[in-house]
Amino acid sequence: MPISPRKFNTFIFFKLPSAWWCGVRLKYMDEQKAVATVTHRWVNQNPFKSMFWAVQGMAAELVTGAMVSDQIQKSGKKISMLVQNNTANFSKKATGKITFTCEDGHLIHDAIQKTIATGQGQTLWMRSVGVNTHGLVVSTFNFEWTVRLKS
């Protein structure tokens, strides 16, 4: 059964409460693309009255990880997933509602199939871009995910 945004947001409440309380919500997901939003508020701000970088990171990682998790579930295999590396670039002050989008879902299927076929762990880089309500990029995150069969 595919993971819906509603089910995933319930998961966030119970398993990632800091993301939930900061306002991170998955809005859309299919096999190719995922979208999450987070709104700048007092609870997630930094001393400079913009969104704390770690909150942006939670939303950015969420859109990549939700797609990886969904495709692992669809594979029917026991596969672990873990972020091995990440990079980030902050290009504008993050205020208001920030929307993070990842369109790298096409990379996941191949990595999962290779780890199933070879038994070897696989890595893939996925990009998540955060834009404000004016359409300006505020931050770009890249996550290196590892997937491997559980023993």
Image (spheres, helix red, strand yellow):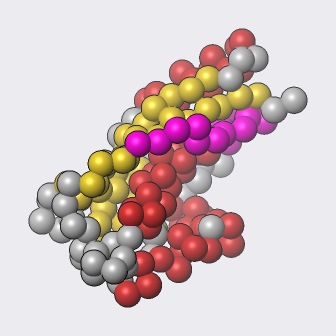
x and y percentages locating residue 34 in the rendered image: 41, 50
* Most distant residue in the right direction: 151
Q: Does residue 7 lie above or below 123 as drawn?
A: below
Question: Start and end of the magenta stretch?
Answer: 70-87
Q: Is residue 116 left or right of residue 45?
A: right
Give the residue at x 28% y 81%: 49
Quadrant assignment for the C terminus: top right
Q: Is residue 7 left or right of residue 88?
A: right
x and y percentages locating residue 12 in the rendered image: 60, 67
Query: Considering depth in this image, is 17 or 10 the residue closer to the camera?
Result: 17
x and y percentages locating residue 53 in the rendered image: 39, 63
Q: Is residue 56 left or right of residue 133?
A: right
Q: Any magenta on residue 73?
A: yes
Query: Considering depth in this image, is 116 or 47 the residue closer to the camera?
Result: 47
Figure quadrant of residue 28: bottom left
Q: Any magenta on residue 118?
A: no
Query: Considering depth in this image, is 85 or 114 the residue closer to the camera?
Result: 85
Marker count (numbered): 0
Q: Is residue 60 left or right of residue 40?
A: right
Give the residue at x 42% y 78%: 44
Give the residue at x 76% y 28%: 149
Viewer can see residue 73: yes
Viewer can see residue 28: no
Q: Does residue 141 lie above or below 149 as drawn?
A: below
* Most distant residue in the bottom direction: 42
* Most distant residue in the front direction: 47
x and y percentages locating residue 72 in the rendered image: 65, 38
